[in-house]
């Protein structure tokens, strides 16, 4: 055999690598990863679609000296098989270049470390011309002219990543302006979620700040940990290859317990269902979410469950992490542990649904339907003591009473429990028996119940003062108060 050096043809390879499949938001996130790994506390994203459109990411991290910068600009600056420091969010030695050049044709990195200012540039058009891996090194005067150079200077350290010639952002859009504006909304949301544990204080660690055009990005915690109705299940730790994968399941509150704003944070009613599943973090950075890894079906009944999985970067090789850090598949040892946990939490999530409305001991409401837990299971019965029922039974003689009782029994036996269950579990729409009763209907009903008391003044005043505890009145306290006030006035 004979060995020959056979390096790739630069113009073709660098153009092809643009199609790795980064989205604008995953590309930005990859740059932010680098800033966080460099110890940045403040990461500013700035963009402008005007004049010479740009996207800039400026951090106050360690920065690089000229030698480090040149190495960082190399494709494959680090072997993916190298061991990384436990806080490092990088892996392939590609992100800075491939993420950037997936969105733009010109990448400039300027950096300041130990008083040394340096900048380097990849320009796809230059590479097309020279047909080589031609890296441009900027001289000092050129660096001074870069936008946000002053920010670097005032920080005394840090790195500026500048994207220009944003050809991908106007693709399929009316203009760069439209593409960039719309894209940055997604970027904001993506950063808020993916880096939420960095954006807020996490244990002892101080938070970092990310802003988009000077507007701070708030953390978006997918578990709603701060909500008092969120259930935190016991944490489990799976040991594998000398490292620990920590698994922390949460059951989110039923959507009826969420304020509109909170529901929106949880992804809306639809998102609540679609975004159930595992949330896998690599060094506290969210890489993949809303999947059960086919260990469970995406079910309506597990939709409240979200499971935080913390994996260290030492297990990258087992998780088969992809370059964009947007896909990873759990290794078999972890899958077994996860399967157990899924089964347990599906059970818990189911309970949040089915136990809702269960008669609590301090529930003083007189329900129309009563939930009865019997030996043979759970059944629903019409409450014979409810004044609505009493208003009829009180006036019946024995033979009619027997007839009426068999009617009630018949209704109860025919209660379409299975159909209701299937509807609740499969359909996004709510099951609704009637339109909400109107104030007029309720006033009529109250009048009928009052009439059924006959002339007994104690019965009448008892009914009026307890009307708010009676279904359906208990669901609309304001209307009921108004009705009671009117009836007490004798109107
Ligand atoms: N913002 C930054 N601050 C300091 N160093 C950086 C920054 N961005 C990139 N680097 C350096 O460049 C290297 C290459 O980055 P990258 O291509 O994203 O690959 P990776 O993150 O996998 O190492 C990093 O390992 C780091 O040493
Ligand atoms: Mg990186």
Image (cartoon, rainbow, N blue to C red):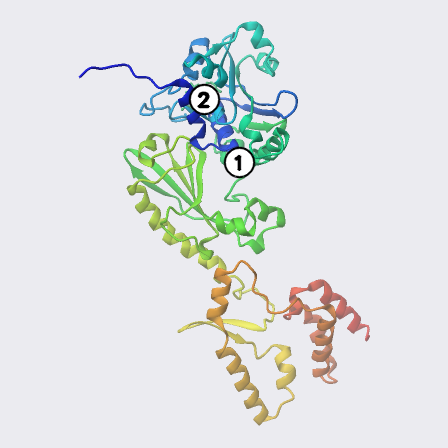
Q: Quadrant of ligand 2?
A: top left
Tell me the distance, in whole angstroms, between the alpha carbons under discs 1 and 2. 20 Å
Dot label at residue 13 = none
Is 352 situated left or right of 212 in this image? left
Percent x, y for residue 352? Answer: 48, 57
Instruction: Give above or below for 370 relative to 401.
Output: above
What residue does disc 1 label?
A: 190
Q: Residues within 10 Å of mark 2 (few under 14, many from 20)?
A: many
* Residue closer to the observer: 318 or 235: 318
Q: Which residue is mark 2?
A: 97
- Is residue 355 something one can see in this rendering? no
Q: Is residue 399 above or below residue 37?
A: below
Cβ of mark 2 under 8 Å from ligand 1: the answer is yes
Q: Quadrant of the C terminus?
A: bottom right
Residue found at x 53% / y 58%: 428
- Provide residue 160's location: percent of width, then percent of height: 54, 18
The residue positioned 46% from the left and 48% from the top of the image is 276
The quarter of the displayed image where residue 429 is located: bottom right
Is 443 above or below relative to 15? below
Quarter holding residue 257: bottom right
Tell which circle, 1 or 2, labels the residue nearer the N-terminal end: 2
Residue at 45% x, 27% y: name it: 18
Q: Nearer the viewer, residue 443 or 137?
A: 137
Q: Secondary structure at mark 1?
A: helix
Of helix, strand and loop, which one carries label 2? helix
């Amino acid at each position: 055999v004979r060995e020959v050096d056979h390096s790739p043809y630069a113009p073709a390879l660098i153009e092809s690598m643009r199609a790795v499949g980064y989205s604008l938001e995953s590309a930005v996130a990859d740059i932010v990863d680098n800033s966080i790994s460099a110890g940045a506390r403040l990461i500013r994203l700035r963009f402008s679609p005007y004049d010479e459109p740009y996207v800039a990411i400026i951090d106050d991290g360690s920065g690089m000296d000229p030698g480090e910068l040149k190495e960082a600009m190399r494709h494959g600056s680090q072997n993916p098989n190298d061991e990384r420091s436990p806080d490092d969010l990088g892996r392939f030695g590609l992100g800075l270049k491939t993420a950037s050049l997936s969105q733009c044709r010109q990448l400039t990195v300027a950096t300041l470390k130990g008083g040394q200012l340096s900048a380097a540039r990849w320009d796809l058009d230059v590479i097309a011309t020279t047909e080589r891996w031609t890296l441009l090194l900027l001289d000092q005067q050129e660096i001074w002219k870069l936008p946000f150079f002053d920010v670097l200077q005032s920080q005394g350290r840090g790195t500026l990543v500048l994207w220009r010639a944003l050809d991908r952002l106007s693709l399929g859009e009316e203009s760069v302006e439209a593409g960039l504006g719309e894209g940055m909304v997604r970027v904001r949301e993506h950063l808020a979620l993916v880096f939420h544990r960095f954006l807020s204080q996490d244990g002892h660690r101080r938070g970092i700040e990310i802003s988009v055009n000077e507007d701070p990005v708030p953390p978006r915690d997918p578990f709603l940990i701060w909500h008092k109705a969120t259930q935190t299940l016991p944490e489990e730790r799976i040991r594998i290859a000398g490292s620990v994968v920590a698994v922390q399941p949460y059951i989110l509150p039923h959507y009826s317990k969420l304020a509109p704003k909170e529901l929106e944070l949880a992804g809306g009613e639809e998102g609540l269902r679609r975004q159930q599943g595992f949330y896998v973090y690599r060094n506290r950075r969210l890489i993949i979410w809303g999947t059960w890894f086919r260990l469970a079906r995406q079910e309506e009944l597990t939709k409240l469950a979200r499971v935080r999985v913390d994996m260290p970067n030492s297990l990258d090789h087992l998780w088969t992490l992809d370059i964009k850090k947007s896909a990873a598949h759990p290794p078999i040892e972890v899958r077994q542990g996860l399967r157990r946990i899924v089964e347990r939490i599906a059970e818990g999530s189911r309970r949040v649904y089915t136990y809702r409305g269960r008669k609590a001991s301090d529930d003083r409401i007189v329900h129309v339907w009563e939930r009865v837990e019997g030996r043979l299971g759970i059944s629903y019965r019409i409450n014979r003591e409810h004044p609505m029922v009493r208003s009829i039974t009180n006036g019946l003689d024995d033979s009619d009473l027997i007839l009426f009782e068999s009617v009630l029994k018949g209704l109860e036996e025919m209660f379409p429990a299975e159909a209701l269950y299937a509807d609740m579990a499969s359909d996004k729409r709510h099951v609704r028996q009637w339109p909400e009763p109107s104030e007029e209907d309720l006033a009529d009903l109250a009048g009928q119940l009052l009439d059924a008391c006959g002339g007994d003044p104690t019965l009448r005043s008892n009914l009026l003062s307890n009307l708010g505890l009676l279904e359906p009145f208990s669901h609309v306290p304001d209307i009921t108060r108004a009705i009671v006030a009117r009836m007490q006035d004798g109107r």
